[in-house]
Every structure is written in C-alpha cells, then in structure tokens.
Amino acid sequence: MSGKTWFQRFYLDKEKDIIVDLYRRDARDKCALYYRLRTPSHGTGNLITNLAKMCGLPLSMDQNGRKIIEGEIPCYIDGYNRTVYIFRLGNTKAANIYPDGTIEMKASVPAITKTLMSQTKDYSLGIEQSIVKTYIRRECKFRTDLHTHMNANLRPDILIALGICHQIRYPLYYIKKLGLSITQRQREKLDVQREKTAQKYRNSGLSGKNLTRRIDDNTFINFADLLLNAPDYAAENISKIRRSLAILKDGQAVFTNLEKVYLYRYIFTKGVRAEEPFLWEQTRDRPGNSEPEDVLTEAASSILDADIRGFLKQMLLDHKNPAYRSNTLFQDKLLWIARSYQSVGITYAEISDTTLVKRDQAAQMLSEVHSVMPAIQKETGVLLRFLAGIRRIPLTIIRHQVEPGDYFSENIRVLQAIADDPYVAGSDIIGEEINDIRDLLPLIRQIVGIAASRPSFVVRIHAGENDSLRDNVANSLRCIQDSLAEGQPIPRIRIGHGLYTANLKSPKGTELLRMLQRSRAVLEFQITSNVRLNNLSVMKNHPLRQYLQHGIYCVQGTDGGALYGTDSIDEQLALEKFLNLSYEEQLQMRESEESVLTESIQAFEQKRERWEETFRDFLQTMIRAGEHPGERIDSTGSRNCQTEMISAVAQYYSTAIRESVSHRSVSLLGDRQQVAQTVLSDRIRPFPADGLPVVIVGGSFNNDRHRTKLRSDDAALIDLLLENGDPDKIFFVVGHRLSGYESYLLDRNHGKFRVYAIIPALISSKEENLLRKSGAAVCVSIEQAPMGLYKSFAYELFKRRFSILLAFDGNSAGANMIQEAKNSRYKCRIYVSRHSRILSAKARSLDGYARLFGAEETEETAEDIIRLGSGTIKK
C-alpha cells in the first residue's frame, strides 16, 4: 500500500484466510478510513470472487495480479458521541472499528462457508448463511467438546509459538516442501549438517528420491532460528507454515489430505528439542547473562505476527511460574488446549489419542497428565480427559510397520492396563471409515470386556461418517450388544458422527432409532469437519433434527476444531444457521450434554479416589524396595515436585503394562487373505508413459448396499469411445470389482484398448479369478481396504499426469475420487453422469470444475475425450 498509512488489520475467519487491512490514504486525514480485503491463501480466487458477488462489491487486482476488494468504511457518531467506523458485508455488520485501533467483531465467515465458497465458481448460499453473527443464547450455549482429537486441537499460531518456545527441530524436507526462505548463514549450516546426515545413510540401501527424502527428513534447523534469525522472511514463512497446519484451503479435502496435515502438525505436537540452542544473531557478541527466555522474547518482539507474539510471551512467562516451570512440550500443549477451551466457554472435553494404546508411550503420557492437569484445571476451570484411540486401520504412513493382529493385540493389552486411570474416560475406534464395523467384532468384544468391570467406561465408535457403509451405526450397536457377557449392563455408548444410516423413516431406520433409545447411546455431530472432509455437501438431508424429534441423545463436538478452522462456538452457530436448529432443539442438545457431563464428572471423581489409593499402595511398595524416592510426593499423589511425580506415575503404568495379560491377535482380513502382489505377479504392469488415462467410476466405488444399474445412454458413451477412440492414445483404468460400467467396458473391448485395474493389496480367491478372466493388467495399491483405493488413483494418476475422470455411478468413495481429481496437481477433466444422484450433487458443488452429461451430451462428451487423447484441444 505504497503512499498510504496502514492503520490496523483484522480477519473475517478463524484461520486468518480473509484478511482486511485498514489504512488512510493521507496521514493528515484523520477521518476517512479505507479497507483492502484479500485472500492470499486461496489460489483459485473463487473465495474472494464469490464473496464480492454475494455482497455486491467490486473486484480489482493488486500489483501481483491477485484479486482484492477495496473501499471506504463509513464513519458514524454513536449515542455516546464516539466516533466509530462500521464495516459491513452486504447488509450485515461485520465489525465496529474505533479511532484508537480497537476492533469489535460482530460477524464472521464460518469455515463451512469458506470451504463451499472456495471450490465452486458459482456459490449459491445466501448471505445469512455465509456471514454469521456470533451470538448464542446463554441457556443454549454448549459447555463440552465430546468429540475431538489430540493433535488437531491447537490453532496453527499456538503451535508455531510452541515450536519457538521449545526450540523444536524443523526438518529440511519441510523447508523445501513449503518453499520457505532462509538466509545464507542458515543455508550454509544446513548444508554442513546435511552432509553429515548423508554419511549416516550411505550404506542404507536407499537411492534416488527415497534417499534424498530420508536425508532431508533427518537434517534439522532450530525452529526458533528459522523464524527469528530470518526476520525479512518471517512473515512469508509464517504464512506458509500456518497453511500447512490446517486442512486444504481451496475446497473440500479427502482423508489423504488429512493425513498430510497431521504429518505437518506432528513436527510441533510431537516435537523434539533441537540439539543446537537458539542464539539470536543480534546478541551473538553482546556480553551479559541474559536468560534464554528473555532472548527469545526480545527476538520475537518486532517481527512476529501479533497473536504468535502474544502466545509466545505468555509461554515464556509460564516457564517462570512454579506450576509450569518444568513443563514438557506435551504439558504445554495440554495447558494451551485448556486455555483455548476456556476462551470459548468449554469446561469439559474428552480427547481421543492413540498414544494411550502404545506400549512405549502410554505410561509417560499419563504421568505427565497427572503431574500438570490439577494446576491446569485450577487455572482454567477446564477438565481434560481422554479416550484411548484405536485405529480401525493403521495410517498409511505407518502401515508397513505393523501387522493388523499384533497392532490390535498390543492396543488391547495397553488399554487393559490404563483403563482405571481417572483421566481415561474410555476407548474410541477411529480412522477413515473404509471397513465394515462387523469386521472389528473381535476387537469390540475385548473392549466391552474391559468395560464390564468399569461402569463409567465409554465405548465410542466412529461410524456413519460417510455413506459407504450405511449400516455401520446400527451394526456398531449390534456388535456391542453381542459382546456383552451374561448379565452385563450396556456400557456408555457414543457414536462419533452418525451422519449416514438407513433412511430413518424406513423399517431399518425405525429399528435403528429403537436401538439408540434402548441403549441410551449418544450421537456426536461435528458439521464443519463433515463438510471439509468431503462427507457432506448438501445440508438439507442432515439427520440431526430427526434424531432430536425421536428423543435421541445428541451432542456437539469439533473433531479437532483448530485443524478445520472452527471451534465450539462456530460449530454451534453452524448447526443453527445451516441446519436451522431451533432454540428448543439447541436446549434439547444442551440437556443431553449436561447429562453426559454430570455422569463424566462423577466418574472422574470416583475413579480418582480409587486410583489415588492404588497409587499410594504402589508408591509405598516402591519406597520400601528402595526403587523410588517418594518423600517429595505427598500421600494423595498430588504434585509437590513435577519431576518426581512424573517418574512415579510412569513407573506405575510401565509396571501395569508389563504385567497386563496378552490378548489373542485380532484378524480383520476375512476372506481377503491373498497377497495381490504375489498371486497376480504375472498381471502387474506399469501404466503406459504415453497415452491419456481415462478413469471409469461405475461399479467399484459403491457403498455396501448399492448395485450399479446400467443405463443405455451412459453405456452409449462407452460404446462411442471404444468405436472411435485411438487405442494408441487412450487407455482405461478401473477399480477392482470389475462390475457395472467397468464390466460393460471389458465385455465390449475385446482386447482393443489397454485396460488397467487398481486393486487392493489383499484380495480374495474369487477376486483373483475375476481379475484373471478380465484380461486387465493390474496395479497393486498399498491400501488393504477396497474403499481406500481412491487414494491410489490419486497418487498413481491424478498427481502425476493429465487425465480424464468419467464417473457414472458411486457413493462416497466415488465422490472422493471426484474431489481428488479436482484437487490434483495436474489438470483432470471431470465428467459426471446426471443419473447418479450422489455424484451429480458432488459435481454441482464443483461448478466450473466438473461437467455433467446425459443423453443430450453423450456425443459431445465422447468427442471431447477423444480429442483430448489426440491432443487436438488444449488440456
């Protein structure tokens, strides 16, 4: 803003994506105030374009060719004779701005709105759902977050501040990946360290990109050094790092995007202190004995984002507070999670965390919780408890390290050892819902067995998050019921999401409602994550109000709100605005929440009393044996000395885990026990380097109850491609089921075109025979579950080359394929049949990126694809 006087800045959203800069055109003019609105994190320009269109505001371009909105903010005199500038979007007051720089936010743009506005060129929701006034009736205000995840809870700015405060190491790989700028001195230091790291891996057997990645992953810079000793690049680097710590910006994401975000977050949430301590360049040669915290404070004072600076300042003050002086990174994380909840009026949260079922980590985690949580609760009034998260399928990033049976067996063994801890509320089956919950019945039986002697133990299952397995919610309840021992009462059941089930008005839906009522199960809803993870695009079919009408217990969660740009207040506003939730319905949810809250607090107090007695006995035994100096821990086990408390509780749980009874392995393979790489080795072929891949979605991407029915006009499109296409320039890629339109393609191909099937890592003998008979070549995925194959289509094709997606039929996995194609690194032409209700709805939400076709467009679509294959039209 050359020639203008900058005044202040604010943001219209929680993720700082919609930036409003305020300025005066003439420093002598103290009356007129102007604004510039920009969205630099959104590369497509859809967000700002749709916002301008909706609010009737003119768009212009800045000097870098990016779209902006500029204008003057009207000045008023209020009833107290105060000058106030009122910033409006449409007819909605968004902010009051005062001459002293104070800004009072009156409305904001929810993360849901921002996502939907970002991925289409023709946004259709009204301004009342898009710019939301942030007021909630006091008696309706929710006070809990009962569905959230440990490493998704903290805002990016807090994570960045924690990274500086704890001087974590930051990998060279991510410096390169994010395109961060560094100084010449930093580059030279990294070059020296990288050379040393390379020597360690010279005999590793790795080569090429794998070797480069391994070396860069293990070459580090002190994160404080990265930001504070490169002040000229700090603002740009912070912006890039902040973007990496939240879900995909320009539209809806899929689970693969979520996994990547967690990798970026793990750098901070599981951070390791850098070996080389931070030394601020400006004080390198300055004499004196300044404390490290004081040096950090001074270094950050002039260059960091104001919010990050404020968080960092408080963190450094905390480390002078006796209650937090010895805090580890994890304990500081708990403290800031509690403070974040306190700021939005949450007093109780249950956080799902897989650390609690890891043999080598659970004891340390609980010891750190016990040593700091009393002080955190005393300061904030927030009680944090935890659900031991068991992944229904290992993350892609660790899948090669574990066998399913060993994985679940260890989880159960550790859970058995920690289940009586007062901070452990229960268990949670988490992860992408790509397998039938009935496959996990052996696991659920063991969890229900653990709950048998613990009446307050919560058994939560993530189910009904997508429409691939609509019976998963009902089957979750059945699995728990079938796992009960004779005379055992039903445990406290919670279902995470519950978004997709059988039609609640159908006989199956009616039976589900009866099951929910009988079991007193609680359904947890989090609408923002549903939208941002591509599980919900059309709000009118959301079932929450139907559940409430039938008296089902329903509560709200955030699903780890910071990762999705939301919090409990925004979530509640979204329920009200997008689902038209009434005052009475919100009160009903508040009553359900209060019931859960009361039971949970009582359970915590009762478990704490029992645990303290057991812990005292253990501690006395250790002291008598001379194995622990217990004089600095009082009889209640409370913290007089944080270090001693951590050590004692860690010993307690390490012993419990070591002595825990082993459980039988849990196999989820069913009849899919053949290793595809082995049994179909003669059919494995690489994709051609030449030619245009045409991906067919029409049989392999249906849910468990949906069978594709061929339509003559859609089948005619395949006929035209087979008749008129050039087999040297086009090849087809299908899923593993070879059904529906995939089968039609193979039946009529007669070997003319090359056809490839991407198949799961494990297959049944029936699938092997079908693939052999088809004549298709195969590409074997690392995914074991068929519903996860969409990730491999994205990795093998959409992210590597120009391609075509031709979607005839499918459910959530098909919608994920469309979203992956839209998000792809290379352009992908997306064609979707009008006849597919779910996929056509998805295509409409991607207006400008996906094309619908029907009988009238059959010939035109075929001609487009053939011309694209021949390269005669621009890709």
Image (cartoon, grey):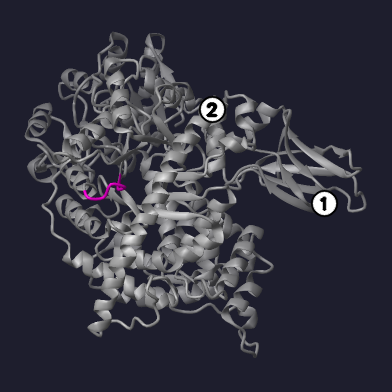
Q: Identify which amino acid the numbered label 1 is placed on.
A: Lys
Disc 2 is placed on an element classified as helix
Question: What residue sits 89% from the left and 42% below the top?
Answer: 80
Depth check: give the residue in front, 403 or 175. Answer: 403
For residue 839, say whether it is visible. Answer: yes
- Determine the CA span between mark 1 and mark 2: 40 Å
Determine the image quadrant of residue 712.
top left
Q: Measuring from the top left, give residue 145's x and y in whole percent.
A: 46, 45
Determine the image quadrant of residue 130.
top right
Q: Measuring from the top left, give residue 456's x and y in whole percent.
A: 31, 47
Q: Rate crowding at label 2 as few (under 14), some (14 to 19) or many (20 or more) other CA atoms within 10 Å.
A: many
Q: Earlier in the sequence, mark 1 or mark 2?
A: 1
Q: Read off the residue under disc 1.
A: 4
Q: Is residue 779 left or right of residue 461?
A: left
Disc 1 is placed on an element classified as loop
Q: Read off the residue under disc 2.
A: 578
Q: Select label 1 or label 2 by which is in front.
A: 2
Q: Is residue 679 left or right of residue 482?
A: left
Depth check: give the residue in front, 118 or 140. Answer: 140
For residue 159, say whether it is visible. Answer: no
Which secondary structure is most common in the magenta stretch? Answer: loop
Q: Identify which amino acid the numbered label 2 is placed on.
A: Phe
Q: Tell me which segment is drawn in magenta.
A: 453-458
Q: Is residue 218 above or below residue 106?
A: below
Whether 515 is among the magenta residues is: no
Depth check: give the residue in front, 845 or 79. Answer: 79
Determine the image quadrant of residue 780.
top left
Whether 456 is among the magenta residues is: yes
